[in-house]
Image (tube, rainbow, N blue to C red):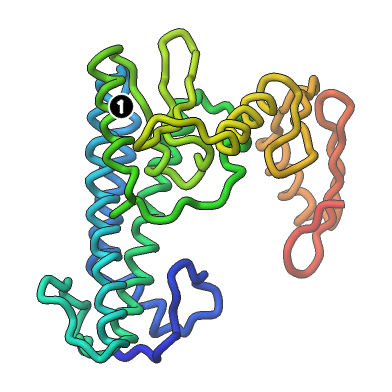
Amino acid sequence: MSIAPGEVKPGQPLAGMAPALLGAIVMHPAQQAIFERILKLIGWLRACDEPSDYDQFQRHLFGDIHQTEERRYKCNQAIKRLRSHKAVPADAIDLFGVADPTNVAAWQFELFMHERLARQLRCVGDALAWRCYRYDRPAIIALSRNDSPGPMYNKAGLPYELGRVEEIWKDDGHFALLHDLTNCLRIADLSEIVPGGMTWLREIKAKPHTDSRQMARAQAAIDATFSDGPIPESDARFVQLDTPFRTSISSLRDCIQLAKQRGAQGMKLSQGRARDYIARRGPTTMV
């Protein structure tokens, strides 16, 4: 496999990539393995019910993400050493296929892959977050209003966050969600899930002190969710709608099929709503 230098960067979207490169991404052994792992994790998460279930699930998800980010870190090390005209580290990971370990572009591809894999695993963490927050969309949106903290591997404060998760579990029997395992939770470090529907946001520091900016952002997220405050980094506010959300999928399907046969079709729906469809050459269009 040959990849041009600078062709891929961590976080780069797949749109516009050459077919050969897309094939290399999909067929990468680590990508193939992560497909199977994510399927198992999703099945496991769906079966979680008690705090102990979530605690065990989180430990395994942490292991998967931490290992993936360790490999990403080693790719970065190899790139830096090669650019400094040094040999790659002795503990460097194996490259995909027949890639040349002295080629910076080969390591850039691996770096791209492992950033992508960690993000995919964090999507499972997002599903965990949604369950912990009982699918409360405003809470998730409010807590997402921050820049990504970046990789957690080698993060100075990680041992303290893990220690606090363990402490909360042992002392109180409460599950504490580690935000670094998600893409969506970017304000505060932990969410302590308390029986009865209460959730505590926790900011963990190596040395006990108060960071007024981080505390203010956490409070803003809470106010936006529960007290009609502005969403962090925005003047917008959540609005509670009284109109029930209803779908008419079966009627929609029938209407589209009739529009294909007749050229146009209108159909009255419940609550005084109506839909008109016109079938043209190409996709059916709603008007």
Does 274 sit left or right of 134 as displayed? right
Q: Mark 1 packing: few (<14 Cα in 10 Å), some, or many (20+)?
A: some
Against 55, residue 178 (above or below) is: below
Q: Amino acid at mark 1?
A: Tyr
| Picture quarter with the N terminus | bottom left
Q: Position of residue 44 (x, y in %)?
A: 27, 34
Q: Position of residue 236 (x, y in %)?
A: 79, 38
The quadrant where residue 98 appears: bottom left
Q: Nearer the viewer, residue 255 or 179?
A: 179
Q: Position of residue 195 (x, y in %)?
A: 41, 10
The quadrant where residue 204 appears: top left
- The residue that label 1 is drawn on is 54
Does 167 sit left or right of 133 as displayed? left
Against 35, residue 78 (above or below) is: below
The residue lying at 63 percent from left, 31 percent from top is 221
Q: Nearer the viewer, residue 76 or 267?
A: 76
Which residue of the protein is positioned furthest toward the top in this rendering? 196
Q: How many marks?
A: 1
Q: Position of residue 65 (x, y in %)?
A: 29, 50
Q: Secondary structure at mark 1?
A: helix
Q: Nearer the viewer, residue 38 or 283?
A: 38
The residue lying at 34 percent from left, 69 percent from top is 113
The residue lying at 31 percent from left, 20 percent from top is 168
The residue lying at 57 percent from left, 42 percent from top is 144
